[in-house]
Image (cartoon, helix red, strand yellow):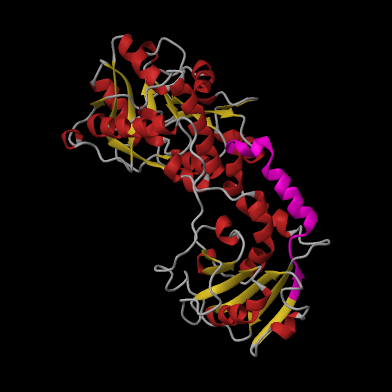
Amino acid sequence: MDPIDIVMLSHNRLEYLEATVDALEARTPEPFRLTIVDNASGPDVRNWLAANRTRFERVIALPQNEHVAAFQHGIDATTSDPFIVTDPDLVVPELEPSWLARLRGLLERHPDLGLVGASFDHHVPPDGDRETEIVDANVGTWFQMIRRDALREPYVKDSSACQAVRAAGYRAGWTPTVVVEHLGAHDAAHYPNHIAAKNELVSARIERSELSPYPFYYAQLEVIPRPPTLSELALAAPALAEIRAAGIPPASVVELTWTTPSVAAVFGEAVALTSPAPSPVPLGDGAAGAVVVVEPPAAAVEEVLAEAFRIAARLVVLVGDLETVGGRMADELAPQGWSAVERPAAGSIVRELARLGDELPALGSTERFTAVQHRDKWLSLFAAGAFGDGPLRAFVFRRRDALPVPDRVRGQDDLPRWRPQPPAAPPQASLLRRALRRGARALRRFGPLRRAG
């Protein structure tokens, strides 16, 4: 069997790309040549491609992100007939005969089939399609196998490619007999900036009538978490550095705050109570791994700290100024059985830089989601900024005989906890919701559709 050319389009998300290539090599016994077209990825992907160059037939590195249309560079550089185009976040299954043999067999048994792709692991085919070898419908770049004679125009987007194949007199569809694992289904959690940029691009294209609404089935803006502001990251970073050093998971943190929550804005799984009554906090003894107290009123600090020491299994961090504690040292605030130290919180200059950063036009776009995608790096940056003059101090208290740390705050379900508001909806939001509904109906009827890309 002659080798088949596989054209894979990459843009960032290195862990997905690695998993996709590894599975492809391990689960494809037939000969193939892999061409990577890289859409101006970050240094991590480009360095990996350079270090693994011998695994590929060629690497076509583009200076700008050309999105889906970049597939054409790889198609033009390859010669096999048929050829394959695919996204870099799809893990092929272990099958006998292989996934590649099955797709090739479909083209051989169906001379009128010009394009056939795989289906997703999280897609359930309609009842009538479960025993069907081929579902005639548009399909995304999920290991699309294409006859060269069937695609007679440049590859611009998947739906256009399917239409072009039909215009050439062939069928186009997908098969339930090859089900790939879609790593990109987790993009909203792992790569929110990637999803936000993709949604913005597709929103503009649908406004220009360049796309049908159906790709919006995979462009659900609602699932992207609200990114923290730089100001929230700066305020939370010193306390979170102590929490992480103590090995306490964010879900086991209670934040008692008299300002806008910052710890819970950075980690939504933390429990924040705003302007709580001094006592009692409706949680049991040792219910949380750590309690962060942020700028309590001076008159209530004694009662608030007593509650924090009761609730915390291992750590309490008080963020406030010296007037709040009456000028007392950390060891004067610590009860019996606790050690204490005073540390600087985020300095005035660092917090002012964060505030100005929040006003940058760049952070009004999809770049704001880097605060989720690169949260740890932002926290490290701002934790290093805990120096210089500033009114706030961080008083850190550690229980000498620590109690077991729960995985999540016990008894949190009935608390009136603070929740971050979602990002402001873009002008196309109502269009998005309508398109999602139409896309869901079409999905049930026709099968998987191309996700926005």
- Please say if 195 is above or below 302: above
Q: Quadrant of residue 441?
A: top left
Q: Quadrant of the N terminus?
A: top left
Query: Magenta stretch: dominant SS?
Result: helix
Whether residue 365 is in magenta: the answer is yes
Q: Residue at x 49, y 57 (%)?
A: 419
Q: What range is drawn magenta here?
A: 342-366
Q: Residue at x 56, y 48 (%)?
A: 227
For this view, does 347 lie left or right of residue 208?
right
- Please say if 62 is above or below 299: above
432 or 140, which lies in front? 432
Q: Residue at x 46, y 32 (%)?
A: 87
For this view, does 255 lie left or right of residue 411?
right
Q: Position of residue 49 (x, y in %)?
A: 61, 36
Q: Position of residue 407 (x, y in %)?
A: 47, 70
Residue 124 showing in the rendered view: yes
Q: Position of residue 151 (x, y in %)?
A: 39, 13
- Please say if 392 is above or below 125: below
Q: Quadrant of residue 106?
A: top left
Residue 100 showing in the rendered view: no
94 or 396, which lies in front? 396
Among all residues in the image, which is located at the extreme front?
299
For this view, does 22 lie left or right of residue 178?
right
- Please say if 38 is above or below 351: above
Whether residue 249 is in magenta: the answer is no
237 or 296, which lies in front? 296
Q: Position of residue 303 (x, y in %)?
A: 60, 81
